[in-house]
Amino acid sequence: MFDLSQINSCVNEHQKTSTQDEGKGAISYITNAPGAMSTSALKNTLNTHKECLFSSSQTSINQSACSFPSADPLPVFLEQQANLITDSSTHFDGVLSGGILDSNGAQGSDSANSSKDIDIVMDDQISIEIESIFREMSSWYPAYLSNIDDFYKYQLWLSTGSGRCFLNHDLKARDSSYLSEKQTGEQLEAADSPSDSVSSIGPRITTKISSTAKSSVNTTGNGKTIRDPDEVFKKYAPLIPKVTPQNFARFLVQCLKDYHHHIPLEGLFDILYGEVYSNTHSETKEKDKSRFSEVERKGLRFCSIILDIFKDSQSSKGLRSSLIRNSSLSCVNLHEFLRTFLAIKILFTCLKPARDPLMAEFNVPKSYIYKMYSIVCQKYSHKHRSISIPAAENIVLGKSKIGQLMNLIHPNLVSKRLGRRGVSKFYYIGVEWNDALVDTDMHQLLELEIPQINNHFKNLSATIQPKVQPRVPGKHISPTNSTMSKPPQPGPSGNVVFEWLKPTRSFIEMSFKYPFWDCSPRVWKATPNQIPRQAQWAEQKMQRSLEFLSVYKINMGNLIEIVQSGNFTRDTQNILSNTISDSIKTLQNASAKKEAYKHLVLAVLLLVFPVVVASDEEVPFPSKTHFRRSLARGLQEVELSISNTTDEVSLSTFVEILKKMVILIDMTSHKVPPEYAETILNEKVYKLALTQRGETHGSTTKSPLEKMFFNSIVLSFNALNFTIIDGCCQAGDTAVHETISMLSNFLAKKLISAKEDMRNLLLQGSSGGSDKVCQDISYQVFKIVIELFHEALVNPLVGKLPIPVFKFILRTTSELLQSGNAEVKAHEEDFSKESFQCSWVTFNMFQEYLNIMSEVVALSEILNQNTLQ
């Protein structure tokens, strides 16, 4: 017999370790107790004793009239998460989680006819004894742990399609712990909660065999309190790498099921939506000190930690980015996370066990659960009117989602159809409403249908909220220098005016404008196999930032030499990330001000920008691929360094800009098939010509493109509450209309001029006998439009437009570049696909460039203002 006694009791801290073997299956252990055996030691010990462990001639095993095939070595592949959790009473409520990989690295599955479940349990001395493990040539399937009460010994047994093998005959209820539901890698194998009770999540993967009475309502954690919210959350930290957009609700249920009783719903609503949508949250926190008890405040702090992980992982207290570096948290939609979090708390709180389960009055209609949830959400939204939640983001989930959450939270609820034929309904049996949440008024609303409930709250809001009047033409409020998020303010005519909100991760302010001179990042004249030179504006700005950084002894000479020489190879891929990392560490050690971090960001962006917008002719595709990887590693390095700096906002914005650059550099290499290139380019020239044809209206003639720009300008002015009023444009409807007409005419003519440049591309391709130029049509058209964009900035009218307004106006380009083939004769399917893809890539390249360039200009403006101060 082989005794792994070094795996001790009370495994309350989880630390995932992994060791990979070339075996055909997988099994996992997690231990972090005093004297616990490490993963490597476990593997070595198993290898040392494998002759004993895996011999097919074991005689100490009682085989109940069943035979097994020859055994082969147990592979130790510790990438999958598992937990051994015990307490002082020797009850074992852990799980050796599923998601086991087969010999091909594919996900395992199980069925009623073909299964192989390993049950790892502990004996009375709380150690693991292994006599033999048999394995067929097929895949390993999810393993799990059974909990057996004091009368039974904890035993190791194996179930296969051909029979069972176990240490002795004491396990009488073994069939009740059979895992019958499929466990996939997309599901959260979340049974590593410190709970002493049966897990309530998903398929039942732990079983307390001697249980004689089961409550249908999940009441776990009634006696549990939160002493230290940070320490409590660390118990759930090992689950974070397995959280995905598909299973994050399971993670939330696992976190809340033991502590939801100490989390006040009103405080949770304020945390979820106040921190995201309100500027008065700091004031609310002060009120919470007297409004909630100490235990409730700790519960709310626990919820805040969970929210921080999903909202901004780098700011989570006590957790390093390495914990979630390879997770899918960034893919979880924050809006879905917030309303799912709220729904889970409501569903945990709404029901309680019935005082008399035999009384029909204590049965809850199943359809009322969703009504109750909808009423609570709208009730709290109405109560917290100071929190401005965008109308598009409805906080109420759909019926099907609430049904799924109910199954996760209360998996043992019994439902039964009651009532006379034709009028019967499904009821939850043995439960009643929790009066703390469902009061008398809510009971009355539950008798209404969902549309009536919605109308009730709409009418309630209309009686107290100010009525928004239509905007009076020509009445605008000039933009202020403040761009902080503010609640709607009444305008001069009593209207409610919504002000522009600055994005969280952006340098752009509403008062910022593009410079009147050329602010291009590069010289647009291309030379084959040569890195584009920086434009004068970009070079001057970068040199100023480098001079500022030299005070901190930051030298970026090696990086500049490699980038400007185009030496992008596998050996130089880490130069960007290393330079950024070293520079940030230097600023951290020097306790540098926020201005220093901004100079670092600007210098790096201006250095790499010319390469990002270079063609494959200038930077060959293999070199561009290495440079892209260098950018990706650089942004990862910034992400890891954000939490310890004094300017998290600037570095977070830096990460977002680098992500856009990675996307943009990929699109610059897009090519169309040579047989379609000339036709696609001809089509673009033809569509531009169509937009040039003017239509006479009264005494004026406007082209379709000019009308498009005019409508976009009016829309952007109204949406962003902006108007042009200065020496050349006096206040008044007529003057504003004339100014907008002048601006739309200028922009339309500037874009129409691209037609000649496109024709030159056709002539260049035909005269040169090569279709290379025509194949990268999307890049060539993008380059033409970008040059025209920078030329347009010198116009006095364009120079008066704030950056957000001009960006809004230029989105009309998408209507031209993505406008399909409606004006052209029908083509074959492949051509239409290539033509649409070319237009789509061109438009997105322009939008990404515009976003990046706007951030660079805004950051430069911020540093200019700091210098003047």
Image (cartoon, grey):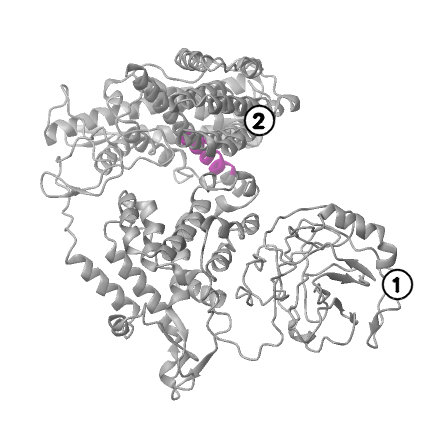
What residue do we see at 16% from left, 30% from top?
Answer: 737
Badge 1: how crowded within 10 Å, few (<14), some, or many (20+)?
some
Q: Dot 1 lies on which element?
A: loop
Where residue 165 sits in the image (x, y, percent)? 79, 70
Sequence-wise, the earlier of marks 1 and 2 is 1
In this rendering, does residue 817 appear at all? yes
Q: Which residue in the protein does label 2 denote?
A: 630
| The C terminus: image quadrant | top left
Where residue 425 sits in the image (x, y, percent)? 39, 80
Label 1, label 2: how far apart the Cα atoms are: 53 Å
Q: Which residue in the protein does label 1 denote?
A: 56
Magenta residue check for 839: yes
Number of marks drawn: 2
Q: Amino acid at mark 2?
A: Ser
Per the rendered image, the range of residues in magenta is 834-847
In the image, residue 399 above or below residue 782: below
Where residue 632 sits in the image (x, y, percent)? 55, 31
Where residue 463 sits in the image (x, y, percent)? 14, 58
In this rendering, does residue 423 appear at all? no
In the image shown, does 564 or 526 lie closer to the viewer?
Answer: 564
Q: Quadrant of residue 132?
A: bottom right
Q: Is residue 166 left or right of residue 578?
A: right
